[in-house]
Amino acid sequence: MDLGLKGKRALVCAASKGLGRGCAEALAEAGVALTINARGVDALEATAQHLRDTYGVPVTAVAGDITDEAARAEVLAAAGEVDILVTNAGGPPPGLWSDWDREHFIAALDANMLTPIALMKALLPGMMDRGWGRVVNITSSSVKSPIPQLGLSNAARTGLTGYVAGTSRQVASKGVTINNLCPGIHATDRADALDTAVTQSTGVTLDEARATRAATIPARRYGTSAEFGATCAFLCSQHAGYIVGQNIVLDGGAIVATI
Ligand code: NAP
């Protein structure tokens, strides 16, 4: 299927690895010129070079913490006018409800709610003026079914979900869609970090921790960044203009719900 995205420009945040990289790769394959971001320079440059070499699209790499206002301004300046925004940042650490104080919640809100909102505020006006735009926020299936040990994530991402529910309806008439992708368990460094925490608390091996988690998923496996990225590219495509304010769960069937 031709996604109709050739020549469009995208900013994909937190995209040197994992799900963000999967989105960048699928957009590059569709002919989109990219600005990508992550904090670590080496992995970011390697990803940018891979995308240029593989797909022949222009890729600008801007290193910096997307949750930091000054770094975000640099990323936005380098990206310029973009048609597609994919927001992403690292997830908050796991813990217990009794561990977290105000500063922990503020950090989680900054990373997983206020940063995507700031990016949308900066880029939506241009998209609306030009009459076309796509925003995809990488959130988590925890907005639909909370993960008890990820209370910071549950709280911050639900705030973003509420913001998108209202804002997406305010911009849709200008040809701009905003949707959220809600990953369940995917095979990335983030999943490794969570599984490693299980090995430390229970004494099981990493493979055992993975197998135990995979067994809880109807698909009996973790998702891949490539299939996640393909879904993102479809949401950004010319075919998805009527999908507005949705939360698309990619979890191998892990959340048991009729709708
Ligand atoms: P990952 O494999 O750890 O990759 C994270 C990427 O984001 C890396 O490129 C990292 O590069 C970059 N990054 C992290 N924090 C950043 C920041 N503050 N500014 C700029 N770049 C940043 O993680 P992932 O699995 O792709 O997860 C992506 C998001 O989805 C996270 O919020 C995660 O919590 C959420 N999620 C993941 C899963 C899953 O199973 N994988 C499930 C539900 C939700 P640098 O470290 O160099 O910055």
Image: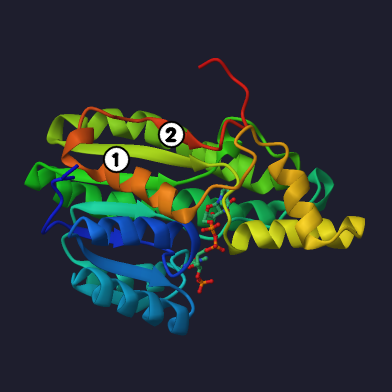
Q: Which residue is mark 2?
A: 248
Give the residue displayed 54% in from the left and 37% down from the top.
Answer: 158
**In front here: 159 or 243?**
243
The part of the image, by quadrant, that contains residue 15 is: bottom left
Q: At which x and y percent is residue 32?
A: 19, 60
**CA separation in Å, label 2 and label 1:** 10 Å
| Circle nearer the N terminus (2, 1) | 1
Question: What residue do we see at 24% from left, 66% from top?
Answer: 34
Looking at the picture, does residue 142 appear above or below residue 211?
above
> Label 1's element?
helix
Q: Pick the residue in front: 243 or 221.
A: 221
Instruction: Specify the quadrant that holds the N terminus.
Output: top left
Outermost residue toward the top? 258
Q: Residue 65: horizontal and vertical position, in percent?
A: 47, 71
- 11 w.r.t. 179: above or below: below
CB-based contact (under 8 Å), mark 2 and mark 1: yes
Which three-letter amino acid code belongs to the residue tagged 1?
A: Leu
Residue hosting label 1: 235
Q: Position of residue 176 (x, y in %)?
A: 20, 39
- Label 2 residue near ligand 1, CB within 8 Å: no
